Each structure stands twice: as structure tokens, then as C-alpha cells.
Amino acid sequence: MADFHKPKHVDAVIPLKHLADLKVRVVAGSTLADLQCKALPPFSMEAVAFLTAWSKRLLSRQDVRDLPDVASFGFWCRPANLARLHRQLNLEPLRIGRGVALHIAPSNVPVNFAFSYAIGLLAGTVNIVRVPESLPVQAYLLCEIAKDLLAQSEHALIASMNTLISYTRNDTVTQSLSAVADVRLLWGGDQTVQHLRHMSASPRCIDIAFADRYSLCLLSAPAVLTAHKKALRDLTVGFYNDAFLLDQNACSSPHLILWQGTEEEVEAAQERFWDAMQALLMTKAQLPGIHAIEKFNHLCRSAIKIRGCKASPTRDNRIFRVSLDEVPENIADNRGRYGFFFETIDNDLAKLRRIVNMRYQTLTCFGVDPHVLAQQVISSRLAGIDRVVPVGQALDIGVIWDGYDLIRTMSRIVATQ
Amino acid sequence: MSTLQNYINAFTSTFLVEESDLANLKYQDIAAWDSVGHMSLMAALEEIFGIEMDIDDIIDFSSFEAGKKIMLKYNVKMD
């Protein structure tokens, strides 16, 4: 076979010297040219020590008080949780990271790059992480601390095989990085992911693509009606975190609510639930006018596009609700933001079965056992829904995400038989 | 240092409060013990006592006193 057709894929142990001229800014860790491309086994002591230090620094800072997503990341990578994850995964002993992982993180979820990176560290890959160019405060803080830790001698090994970089969107740069990647974690909208996928990578490169996803919520009306005060409070706080914290921009934020119960129960439960949501929202930041307008526009668009769409009264524009008797199959194309929800009653989940496709990601639930629902996803042979979790956990990124076992996918087994 | 003193220190160092204020301290009584402060406290307790707390226990950990009972589940006894 003619060698000149092969992409320029350097030997994994030789530093990526040819990348020295790429115009990127190193935010933390090694420069591209000095990156040591030797992987580690999953959950290596070095990676765990670095994540532990990152967690500790984040959780001890006063300014993290106002950044619950950063705090959640810090809490997630605390040693006790890493030990638990490691145990639960029950990995085959002879595993090692799959060479170089390129992480193209999205900008809609500020802490996403940190989770992507942390999962790479746990898998044992060498990591090139592209962080958004204009860093939101959360990402800035995470990067500053990572930079500081990676400069310490005790994290020298991790620093030598990891780099967090930023650059103005530039296909030449992404293309050069892509060419040396053994794993690409591509986060973004469908178009971005398609675009990135067209860039050539090493022949054995594995793509883990996190494209546009759609998520929904299932609420049991009797459970909402009988919930005592604290349970109702937890439900609303959980729903707030799932839906409102990131303005419904996250892939796992719910857009459609399926209710279970009789019509009377659902009506009463809706009143109780949305009244409590309203009360909670009143304690939060004021709604920007532009969001109210966007929701009203979306309501008008929905009224034109969707047959039988009935708007429930809104009190002060914080919550927009549209009730549907029938859910159109393309409801996922009609997602609202900033607190805009479609609602329907679906006792036997027939509506859900009709609309689900591969884009469906997270089903959050209250008053219904997630395991039973997950079993129904399989027994109904649904094309989508990768995750069924209680309300409040929609945004909790895990090592199993979008249906991928990330640690296993990003590492390889050395077989002995 | 006694187990109780370690337990007390986790609170005083996380929330920057005086030991004398702890007896009746409950979740969300003070600004420092909000949901983010709660995460810091749980991480501190896990580290000090070398334990992994279940999510249910983390949620149920509602006061200085209630926490002592939860710690018992992990064989952390306050004498």
C-alpha cells in the first residue's frame, strides 16, 4: 500500500512537534509540541490525585458559592465518588487509555469541557481539550485552578500529557488536531458534529458524538398530589435545576412533560406543581424581558404549527405552558427555552412510544420507578432514550452518557486469550 | 484528636463558625450552609473519616445532630 496516502499520524510516543506552529493559546497544561503521548491505565493514581486536588480547591473557594454547576463538578470529582465510580464500573484489569483524545467542548453548558476532560483523565487518555474562546466565569475559574495545579511538581505527569487550549474557530487547526486523535469527543449541534466528522482522523480513531438531543419529563399526578412539603420542595428545586438553570439549553433539560393520572388528578397536580414552581421562581433572578418575548413568539409559532395546541394561562411570563391532546411526531423540533413546556397526559406511554426517535436522550421522572421505565424502553424496543433518572438529576453528567460507556470506549483491552 | 472533635472541625473549617454555634445548627440556618456549602461539608467528612457516603445520607444530612447519627452507619462513633 502506498504510504503517501496515509494521514500524517505520528508515532504515539513521539511528541507532536509538527503542531508547534498551530496558533492556539495554552490555557493549562503542556504545549501541543511537548505533549507526551503515552496513555495511562483507567483510574490511575496520578489522574485521581489531580482530580482530587481540583475538587478540593473548587469546594473550598468562597466564590464557588454562586456557581452551583462548578460546585457540582467539584463534588463529582471528589475522591469518594471516583472510588465509587471505579468500583461500579468493574473494569477488566488489563486496560489502558486509547492514545490521544481530542475534546471539542460546547459552549452551551459552561462546565461541560471539565466533565469531558475529567472523563478522559479517568479513562487514561492523553487529552487535548478545546475550551471556548471567551470563557464564561465558570470555565475561567475551572481553567485557572487547573492551570495552577498542573504547574505543581506533584502533577507533572498529568501536565505532560494534557493540554487545555483555546483558539478562534479555525478548521485548519481543528483539522491538524483531528489528524492526531485516537478518540474524538465531539460535543455540539448536529451541524457542528457533522462538520467535525468530515475532518479526517487516524484510521482507528473512535468518534463519540454528542449531537442535538431532546429530553422530557414524566410526572405522576397522584405522587405530586400526595407529596409532603419537603418532597414537593425537592421536586421543584430539582426541576428548576434541570430546566431553568441553563434556560433549557442543555441536551438533558426537559421540554415536554408527560403526566400520569386521571384528568382530574392531573389538573389538580398541575396546579400544585406549577404554583410551587412559580413560588420558587419568584425567589430567583428577574426574568429578562427578551426571554418573555422569545417565549411569547414561540407560543405563537406553536399555535400556528401544532394542531390542537392550548396555552395554559401564565401569571407573569416566567412559565409558559402549552397543553396538547395529541403530541405531534416532530415535537422535538418545537422546543422552547427559558421556561416553555408542552404538557400531555400519557398513562400507557403510547404517545411516548410514537414520538421517540434517536434524538431522545433523558427522561426524568417523579413518582415512577426509573428502573421500570428503563426496562420499558428496552421492551418497547425504542430507538431513543439513553437515560432515565429522577427529576433533579438531568444535568448530572456521568461516565455513562448518551448511551456510551465512556471509560470503556476511551480505553482498550489488552487481551491475553 | 477525638472523633467528635474531627466531626466538629469539619463544620467549623467549612462554614467558618464557632464551635459553640454548632449544637443546634441545621441545614440552611446560615448562609454558608447552603447547597454548595453542603457539598463542601460532605466532601470534608468523607475525607476526614475515609468514607463514601450514599446519596440518600447526603440528602438526609439535615443538621449537626442528625449528621452524628448518619455517621454511625459508617462506623464513625462520637464518644
Image (tube, coloured by chain):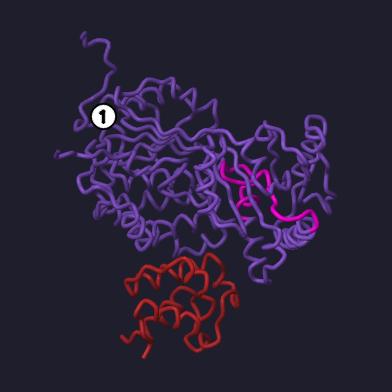
Chain colours: A purple, B red
Q: Hey, which quadrant is residue A238 in on the image?
A: bottom right
Question: From the image, which quarter does the N terminus of chain B lie in?
Answer: bottom left
Query: In the shown orientation, is residue A279 left or right of residue A152?
Result: right
| Residue under the point 41% across and 69% down | B53
Q: In the structure shown, which secondary structural element does the residue marked by tag 1 occupy?
A: loop
| Residue under the point 46% across and 71% down | B41
Under mark 1, the amino acid is Leu
Q: Residue furthest top?
A: A2
Residue A14 locus on image (x, y percent):
19, 30
Q: Hey, which quadrant is residue A162 in on the image?
A: top left
Residue A404 locus on image (x, y percent):
41, 40
Query: In the shown orientation, is residue A205 left or right of residue A221?
Result: left
Q: Nearer the viewer, residue A342 or A117?
A: A342
Question: From the image, which quarter does the C terminus of chain B lie in?
Answer: bottom left
Q: Is residue A226 above or below residue A264?
A: below
Q: Is residue A242 magenta?
A: yes
The residue under label 1 is A16
Residues packed near mark 1 inside 10 Å, few (<14), some (14 to 19) or many (20 plus):
many
Q: Nearer the viewer, residue A178 or A214?
A: A214
| Residue under the point 31% across and 33% down | A32
Q: Nearer the viewer, residue A52 or B16?
A: A52
Q: Residue furthest bottom?
A: B79
Q: Chain of mark 1?
A: A
Q: How many marks?
A: 1
| Residue under the point 39% across and 62% down | A56
Residue A295 locus on image (x, y percent):
77, 41
Residue A87 locus on image (x, y percent):
31, 57
Q: Is residue A273 magenta?
A: no
Q: Is residue A234 above or below residue A42?
A: below
Which stretch appears magenta? A241-264
Query: In the shown orientation, is residue A377 left or right of residue A346?
Result: left
